[in-house]
Amino acid sequence: MSFLRRHKQTITAALVVAVTIAVMGLTARERERITYLEVVVLEIMAPLQGALEFVTSSVVSVSDSIAEVRVLREENRRLEEEVARLSHLLNDLEELMRENERLRDLLGFASRYPYDTMAAEVIARSPGNWFSTLTIDKGSRDGVVVDLPVVTAGGLVGRIVRVTPRTSTVMLITDPKSGVGAMIRRSRDAGVATGQLGSEPLLLLKMFSTKADVSPGDTVVTSGLSQIFPEGLKIGTVVEVSRGEFGLVTQATVRPAVDFDRLEEVLVILARPRGEEAR
């Protein structure tokens, strides 16, 4: 009520003007010419009508803009969800492609050697013994037994040391307790490679002969002089040659061929070629 009192004169004037315009509009249809008063009123009201039309158009425009913003926000949200979904699918596709490439390499390796092999996935590793052991998802129910060799397309990984029905533990060749009969591929000089403690996985190859022909860059392979590892599996590359304590032993530091930081799939060698006796 207070609002009406404060604006009574304004409201009354507006009503009078509105009624006048309405009457003029009705009577103008019946007359060919409009009066001077009508001209004056129309001239006065023209800016007001323009302002009213502008305000009305602005309100409609703002309303349309708000609706459009809402639509755009919803569309943006939908697009963001679609981008996230496609990004996830792309990541899965890249992982599948990499896994397929690794498995293809493993199968290619297996086809080049006359051994029965079985692919297995690495399912566990101990942070405290990263270069000592790992666990694979194949066990006794799959035909795995202790002392079977484990390899990748890159080279020798280790051997099975413990078996359960569903899993097996592999001792890596980088474990200090591991020992592998090895030889220099170029010179055929033989020795034993053992794991070394340190910040990176390295092997120490102690040659049987003090006159062994070994040089940095030489490839080291399994010698076959054991009942576990068949001959010719790649172990690694010589990076340094030295003399042991008192200079009585020729020894070499070997970098493994296998990247033990990124092992995901391996091959378990199940049997030697048919007819070959264990050595």
Image (cartoon, helix red, strand yellow):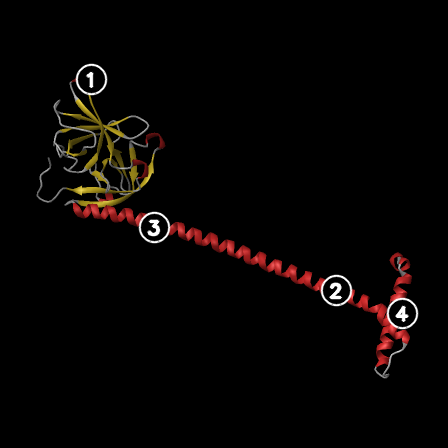
Circle 1 sits on which residue? 245
Q: What amino acid is at disc 2?
A: Phe
Of pointers 4 and 1, the one earlier in the residue sequence:
4
Q: Nearer the viewer, mark 3 or mark 4?
A: 4
Circle 4 sits on which residue? 16
Point 70% across, 64% down: residue: 60
Q: In which quarter of the image is the C terminus?
A: top left
Residue contact at pointers 2 and 4, CB within 8 angstroms: no
Q: What element carries label 4?
A: helix
Q: What amino acid is at disc 1?
A: Glu
Of pointers 3 and 2, the one earlier in the residue sequence:
2
Q: Nearer the viewer, mark 2 or mark 1?
A: 2
Q: Nearer the viewer, mark 2 or mark 4?
A: 2
**Residue 133 x, y percent position in the rendering:** 29, 33
- Distance CA(mark 3)–CA(mark 2): 61 Å
| Numbered mark located on residue 54 in the image | 2
Q: Which of marks 3 and 2 is in front?
A: 2
- Distance CA(mark 2)–CA(mark 1): 100 Å
CA neighbours of label 2 inside 10 A, class few (<14), some (14 to 19), many (20+): few
- Distance CA(mark 4)–CA(mark 1): 119 Å
Residue contact at pointers 3 and 2, CB within 8 angstroms: no
Q: What element carries label 3?
A: helix
Q: In this view, does 237 lie above or below 7?
A: above
Circle 3 sits on which residue? 96
CA neighbours of label 1 inside 10 A, class few (<14), some (14 to 19), many (20+): few
Q: What amino acid is at disc 3?
A: Leu
Q: What element carries label 1?
A: helix
CA neighbours of label 3 inside 10 A, class few (<14), some (14 to 19), many (20+): few
Of pointers 2 and 4, the one earlier in the residue sequence:
4
